[in-house]
Amino acid sequence: MSTISENSAVGRVQGGGGLSALAATLHTTLDRARSKLFDLLPLIVALVTLLGIWELACRGAGSSLPPPSRVVSETWELIINPFFDNGGVDKGLFWHLAASLERVAIGFTLSAITGIALGVLIGQSSLAYRGLDPIFQVLRTVPPLAWLPISLAAFRQADPSAIFVIFITSIWPIILNTAVGVRQIPQDYRNVARVLRLSPLEFFFRIMLPSSVPFIFTGLKIGIGLSWLAIVAAEMLIGGVGIGFFIWDAWNSSLMSEIILALVYVGLVGFILDRVITVIGNRVAGRKVG
Amino acid sequence: MTHPYLSLENVGMDFTVAGRTFHAVTDVNLGIDRGQFVSIIGHSGCGKSTLLNIVAGLTRCTTGGVILDGQEVNSPGPDRAVVFQNHSLLPWLTAYQNVRLAVDKVFGASKSASERHDWTLHNLRLVHMDHAVDKRPDELSGGMKQRVGIARALSMEPKVLLMDEPFGALDALTRAHLQDTVMEIQARLNSTVIMITHDVDEAVLLSDRIVMMTNGPSATIGEVLTVDLPRPRRRLDLSDDARYVGYRASVLRFLYERHAKPEAA
């Protein structure tokens, strides 16, 4: 208290400009923090309400599902210690998530590259479009897990099979959105390219890619979401390290709290993956992708 | 015998739709000298834009041909730069980058990087856009976008500058500003220009010659009017100049008396 009055005394003597500027900065910082808090307030209220209802509903002795308080107390070891590794599949949640993410990264990278290439092909060539689009439209409705037996038969190994399921699940929205993006390139841009005599390669990098980036990233966003959906299901069946198998293992041991904790992590990771693609998309496009 | 710099010879354009052939443009013959500003005016649907696209090489004519500086035109190229009606700037590039793309493509081999940089800025300065080089098209007004479009076309040092209703989408005041800029640039660079327009005042103010098109189908050149007004021209001085009023009246008579659009309400 004494320092403040001292400071203000000095400030007054020296004209007070520096201090009032400091006060203004402090004020705007506080304002910003307050408005941030205000933005988050509805979310916090909703979360507390939902957790409260859940707690009340599951608190009874005969309840088949644990209330949130018991979920936290039963899984506390897993929450505070995500990095342990006792060999085999007895690992911390970080390692399970990392294994799943690695499969998604490989499968999704392959499907992004192949999907964009095929999308450009059917977007540019009406012949390819008429030949391939009907096939893609049928294949894209096949549920992810329906591909698993075929890929297990083809690859005879768990890991490549899971990666193939990711690939085949996420590729369709990437192909179809890229094709739409390429087909909507305005004739004006094509005319500009023709007047400038851009080579096909220059056209691809200078006009086609930037013009269809918003569409491509919409496809990538849907694709990464589907990948994450598919990997959890596929891992339940193929076993090994991975968040899907962790859930299945917990179910076999009737550890409901561990399943619930894993679900929270799956949801958060899926959300982060989606945001990452959006942020990259905005960066690449230099404008909002949506 | 001297050939004109740019000549259209028996140019015709047929479209075949569902087995029926439709003559859009027939027998267009036109010679344009170096440094001339020529407007093509006519009602909508008379094939003005088709004609411009043929000169640009974006469309192939079905009969006849176009010869520019002794060479036949059969594909698009930067020697016939186009200012498109709706600017056609690439929205992910800044004003500078839009012009620079053209400069790099045309002068990539003949100019150094710093020369290309200077040339890009020089052209943006010509159209008075040097204050907004780092703005993207969506941050620019319609008139400013069109200015950048003109800078991009000029930066290619085209043999002929093709403008497809360049000011059609602009309000009257902005349009007047851009017309002044174009006149100023044309006087400075002595460019050869073909401009499509449907604005009579614009045609008379800017042109050395006005090509008036008859209505389609089978549209062709109805009349060519030579506008013999001294340059530099100033719109205020001209508005009650007897010759200007006379030229204006003869274009209006052509468009609304002799070749009025039949279905026009």
Image (cartoon, coloured by chain):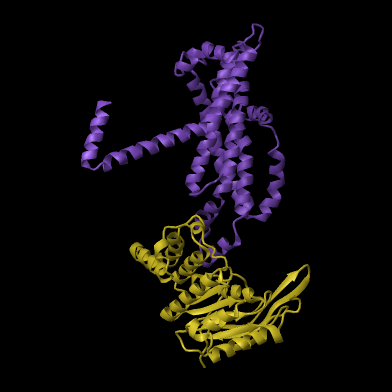
Q: Pick the residue in front: A219 or A52.
A: A52
Q: Is residue B76 left or right of residue A144?
A: left
Q: Quadrant of residue B131?
A: bottom left
Residue B168 higher or lower than B95, as above or below? below
Extreme residue in the right direction = B19
* Image position, residue B86 (x, y; %): 57, 65
User: Does the rendering let one see residue A91?
Assistant: no
Residue B87 higher or lower than A106, as above or below? below
Residue A286 higher or lower than A70, as above or below? below
- Name the image quarter holding the C terminus of chain B: bottom right
Q: Pick the residue in front: B39 or B57.
A: B39
Q: Quadrant of residue A174?
A: top right
Chain B drawn colour: yellow
Extreme residue in the top direction = A61
Counting labels gives 0
Chain A drawn colour: purple
Q: Pick the residue in front: B237 or A69.
A: B237
Q: In this view, does B78 lie to the left or right of B109?
A: right
Q: Is residue B114 left or right of residue B210?
A: left
* Image position, residue B83 (x, y; %): 53, 70
